[in-house]
Image (cartoon, grey):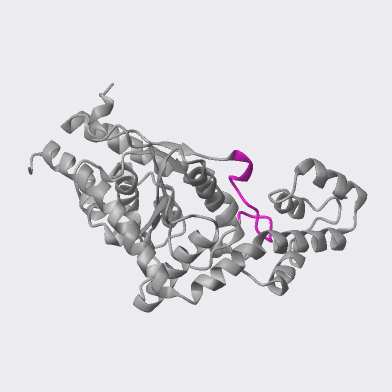
Amino acid sequence: MPSPACYRTDMKQKPVILSGVKPTGDMHIGNYFGALRQFVELANAGEHEVFIMVADYHALNFIQDKEEMKRLTRELAMSYIAAGLDPKKVAIFKQSDIAAHTELAWIFDTITTIPYLERAHAYKDAEAKGRETSVGTFNYPMLMAADILLYDTALVPVGQDQKQHIEYARDTAEKFNRIFGETFRLPKEYIMEEVATVPGIDGQKMSKSYGNIIRMFAPKEELAERVMSIVTDSSGERPEHVYAMHKLIRDEKELAAFYEVHKGKYKALKEALIDDLDAFLGPMRVRYETLRKDPRKIDAILRDGAKRAQKAADRKMEEVRRAIGVR
């Protein structure tokens, strides 16, 4: 096993958590319960150094309009803060502000084979659907590996469906260490199983691509419209999709009793979910709208986060460059 000293130059530093989201559209409650809530809980615990990315270079595979990219990037940063991330405790930054992400991805490209990348879920899904695949989509696992390994990340909060990303990062770290000497720490995924998959209004995984989302900062009127659209099975006494969403914000023992009392009363149960969602999301919605009025504050937070991320990235890249012989 490598000496821990090869992973950190300052052993007083806390172990690192890194995660991020692509700025590709409105944040929804699936993003919150599947990822953001974990970010906030881990950051508030104070046991880790936390880096949270706006993954704008990953988003470039989907968003190819500069004004839309700027808008979505700022809105995602606002969402992070509105959800409870404190920029004084957490480095919130844009991936594109740290050039080392793409430099390290290229270095990883040189030791990665095409058959290995062909195993990636996104590539196989595109192939199965007969879509032409861009180099960016094909190669995104290496950029993601660079994102993770650049910060000596110990823990990566992800959804169950993203576990492969961490496996790619670990494989890449092991291969680099084998070829060039011990340089990278092997990260681990952090998955809260009970919220690994958040159901959408159609019962499938909540996803913008399915059009089945409930927006995180939606007003109550919109929440009501979306919740009332949740698919229910009239053969059962408990609407399972409604219950699955409800238990994310209510104690399950208390909730089970409430659903028993209202057995078969689907409208009443949906109305209760609307009220509970509005109460839960309301404070975040207020923070978000307040941040929207001061875009310069968001830009300043991103600049400050980039400075903090840059220090860590520079430290690691100097080690990497020496390992491969260009320093």
Q: What percent of the width, then of the height, locates residue 152?
A: 31, 39
Q: Name the residue at 31% across, 58% down.
A: 306
- Residue 238 horizontal side relative to residue 89, left or right: right
In this view, the residue in front, 282 or 117, is 282
Asked whether residue 197 is drawn in magenta, I would say yes
Q: What percent of the width, then of the height, locates residue 47?
A: 45, 37
Asked whether residue 211 is drawn in magenta, I would say no
Residue 48 visible somewhere in the drawing = yes
Q: Quadrant of residue 321?
A: top left
Q: What stretch of residues is rendered in magenta?
A: 193-205
In this view, the residue in front, 144 or 70, is 70
In this view, the residue in front, 271 or 14, is 14
Q: Name the residue at 21% across, 48% down.
A: 314
Quadrant holding the N terminus: top left
- Residue 248 horizontal side relative to residue 67, left or right: right
- Residue 96 horizontal side relative to residue 22, left or right: left
Quadrant holding the C terminus: top left
In the rendered image, the vertical position of residue 66 relative to residue 80, given as above or below: below
Q: Main secondary structure of the magenta part?
A: loop
Q: What percent of the width, then of the height, locates residue 33?
A: 60, 52
In the rendered image, the vertical position of residue 114 relative to residue 233, given as above or below: above
Q: Quadrant of residue 173?
A: top left
Tell me how many marks there are: 0
In this view, the residue in front, 15 or 10, is 10
Residue 94 visible somewhere in the drawing = no
- Residue 80 horizontal side relative to residue 109, left or right: right
Q: What percent of the width, then of the height, locates residue 108?
A: 23, 44
Q: Which residue ends up furthest to the top in the rendered image?
A: 1
